[in-house]
Structure formats: structure tokens, C-alpha cells
Amino acid sequence: MRVEYINPFVESAFNILKELVGDNITRGEIFLKASSQPVLGVTAIVGLTGDVEGRVLFDMSTKTAISIASIMNGEELKELDELAKATITELANMITAQAVTKLSELGFKFDLTPPTIITGNKMEITDFEVEALIVPMELEHGKLEINVALRERN
Amino acid sequence: MKTKMDFPNVNERKPEGLKDDGKSFRVLIVDDSMFVTKQINQILTSEGFEVVGTAEDGLSGVEKYKELFPNVDIVTMDITMPNMDGVTALEKIMEFDKEAKVIMISALGKQDLVKKSLLLGAKNYIVKPLDRKKVLERVVMTLKKQ
């Protein structure tokens, strides 16, 4: 997978989180995972199809998801309820939309699926035929991993 | 002897959500995201607007508009929604009431749909992420448009 696909997602996540959550955000080192990998507990998935196809995951622990959703709502949420899930979905929507705009400017055309939220413990995700690049973002409220597996359509 | 006089407070401003007669502007929010609906609701009600209805998809948004008409002053309409998208819902509302004031709520990267909406009669648009200033500015600007 080409590294330039992941950069727009990282830049967008940084901008949007800074604007909405206001944390000091540090970008960790990018790493590659080829096969199955554990996910952290709350995962928003957005699918892409077009010149580039694959999926993007925004992965975080339940505690981090609740903290981020609480800040975005301006009130303390006690659990990962419907509002918290809707908030994380919207966060994924905004980050992806901004990233896709940047990728479109580079000449790639594609459509997005609406985000899906998956929650649970001890989950793994497996991508076949495409490797995943992961960028961890360290926030004051926890870690959010941006996990991108995309390939150019032949 | 000094008497106490009541001067109007020049710093006191009328909330943006109130009409000249002191009544609230009435808003219908059409959005499938509970988070966005809550966000718009909070921003507008804090300025005196009254949210008279909400709908989670375009189809129920159109129905709600017809049900509330003429007691609704402005609609905020998400673009991407299930059942019926915001652009189609806008079209249906404009067919029903050509004076309707609809503001499109868009994610970045939907410029084509925003343009189409403006051609179909939407009065304005707001690109997410939403913030208080942006929402109030666009809503007030739209209400002033004839």
C-alpha cells in the first residue's frame, strides 16, 4: 500500500481532533501489519470504493471513545450509549470526508460507505490481499489508531 | 433628592433566535446523526430559537415539514441520509412550499451536491464540523434573505 494514501487521513484526524477535542495530539510512528490484528474495543469502519478501494478504521478503547464523545457533546457521558456511538460515527465521518477531499485533489475518485461502529472485546480484524498501515495518535484522553488498508483498483 | 432612573442597557443584545415581536424563530432539524441533531439543537436553543421538530431521514423530514407548515421558519437538512437523501427531501419541500428556507448541512467534499441543492432552492449551506459561530451566522443570514 502506498504511504501517500494514509497521510490525508492522519492530517485530517489531527485537524478535526484538534478542533473538536482540543487535545495535545502526538502522532506516533507509522507501522505495517500484514495479517490479523487485534482492535482496541470501539472501531469505526468506513469503506472506500472507486479508483482506490479498501477500508479505514478508527480504533480506540471504550474509555477513550467515551472521553472523546463527552468532550464533543459538552457533557459527561457515563457509558458507550447511542449518543456516544453517534458521536464517534460523526467523528469518523468528518475525518474521512476531509481526507477524501484531499485525495480527490490528488486525482483519485471514489465513494464512501456510511461509517459502521463495531464494539467488543478480544476482536481481531483480518484483511486479505491488502496490507494495513497504522498510525497511532496519542491524545490526552487516550490512544486513537488510524488503520488504513487501501489499494489501487486494477 | 436623587431618584433612581432606569436606562436601557446598551450592552444587552436581543438573542438571534427572537423575531421583532419577541417570539422565537421555529426550526426543523433533519439529520440522521443523533450527535449533529443535538449539537444544532443546543446551539440554536441557547440563542432563543425554538426547535419545533426533528426527523432522522429525508422522507420523514418532508412529512414533518408538511405537518408543521406554516409554523416553521427554517430547516437544517443533512445531505447524506438513509431512506431519502437531503437533496431529494429539499426538492420535495420546495415543491410543496417555494418560499421554504432550507440550509444544507454538508460534510467536506460534497461540493457537487451543495451546488445542486443551491440550484434547487436551498438558501445556504454549512460544512461540518459545526461550531456555534458558523451555525448562528448562516441561520441568521438565511432568515434575513427574502
Image (cartoon, coloured by chain):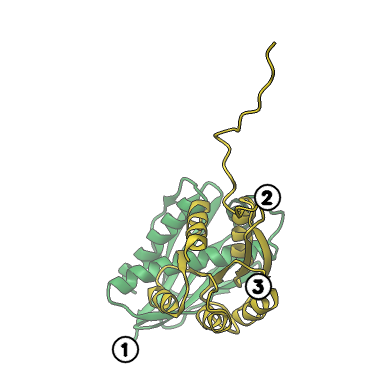
Dot 2 and dot 1 residues touching (CB under 8 Å)? no
Residue B47 spot, x, y in % from top left = 61, 50
* Of pointers 2 and 1, the one earlier in the residue sequence: 2
The residue where tag 3 is placed is B70
Question: How many numbered marks have been drawn onto this rendered protein structure?
Answer: 3
Label 3 element class: loop
- The chain to which mark 3 is attached is B
Q: Against A17, is B13 above or below? A: above
Callout 2, which amino acid? Glu
Q: Residue furthest front?
A: B1
Residue A140 spot, x, y in % from top left = 53, 46
- The chain to which mark 2 is attached is A
Q: Against A131, is A9 above or below? A: above
Residue B82 spot, x, y in % from top left = 59, 81
Q: Against A20, is B81 above or below? A: below
In this rendered view, identify the residue nearer to me: A55 or A13. Answer: A13
* Mark 2 to mark 1 CA distance (whole Å): 47 Å
In this rendered view, identify the residue nearer to me: B47 or A52. Answer: B47
* Mark 3 to mark 2 CA distance (whole Å): 37 Å
The hue of chain A in the figure is green
Label 1 element class: loop
